[in-house]
Amino acid sequence: MDFRERLHRASERGQRAKDTEAREAAARALSEEECRRLHSTNRMALLDHIEKCLNELADNFPGFRVETVVDPTGWGSVAKRDDVGLSRGRSDNFFSRFQLLVSPANKYHVLDVVAKGTIRNKEVFSRNFYQPLGEVDLDRFRELIEQWVLEYAEMYAAAN
C-alpha cells in the first residue's frame, strides 16, 4: 500500500469519526419541543418562589404592592411603592420597585432570571443569572432569588 492510499484511508477514518461525533452530539442535544417544555416547567417552579419572596418583602416594608408581570421581557413579579417627599416647600414624587423576571424561552436554550431594583428614583440593583436548560439547578436559582431580595431589602432600609 503506497502513501497516497494510506493518506486517503486516514482521511476517510477521520471523516467517519467526525460524522459519528456529530450524530452523538445531535442525539444529546435537546429537541426544540423538549426545551420549551423544560423551560416552562422550570419557569413555573421559580415564579411561585419569586412571588413568595416579594410578598414577604412587601410584608416587611409597608407600602409596597406586589403585582404579577407578564410581558415580552418575561414572567415574574414586581414589588413597588410610590412616596411623596417635601423639600424647600415643594413636593417630590419618589418611586421604589424591585422586579424579578424569568426571561422567555430563547434560541440559546437557557433559563435566565433577571432582577432590577430602584430606590427613590435611582436604579441601584441589576442582576441576572442563567444556566443551560439541560443543567438547571433550581435550588441555586432559589438561593440567588432569596439573596437578591435580601440585598435589595438591606439597600432599601439603608436609604430610608
Image (cartoon, helix red, strand yellow):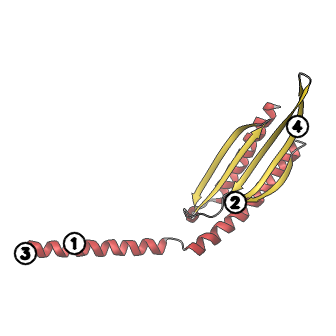
Which is closer to the viewer, label 3 or label 4? 4
Which is closer to the viewer, label 2 or label 3? 2
**Residue at figure coordinates x 56%, y 65% from the top left:** 134
Image quarter in which the C terminus is found: top right
**Residue at figure coordinates x 67%, y 43% from the top left:** 126
How far from the left and from the top, in percent, is residue 51?
80, 56
How crowded pointer 1 is (Cα within 10 Å; few <14, some 14-19, many 20+) is rated as few
Q: Amino acid at mark 1?
A: Ser
Q: Secondary structure at mark 1?
A: helix
How far from the left and from the top, in percent, is residue 94?
83, 36
**Residue at figure coordinates x 62%, y 51% from the top left:** 129
As measured in the structure, the alpha-carbon distance from the residue carrying label 4 to the one carrying label 1 is: 72 Å
How crowded pointer 4 is (Cα within 10 Å; few <14, some 14-19, many 20+) is rated as few
Q: Does 53 sit left or right of 128 as displayed?
A: right
Q: Give the residue pinned by disc 2.
A: 72
Q: Give the residue pinned by disc 4.
A: 83
As measured in the structure, the alpha-carbon distance from the residue carrying label 2 to the one carrying label 1 is: 49 Å
Choose the circle earlier in sequence order: 2 or 1.
1
Q: Give the residue pinned by disc 1.
A: 11
Q: Mark on residue 89?
A: none
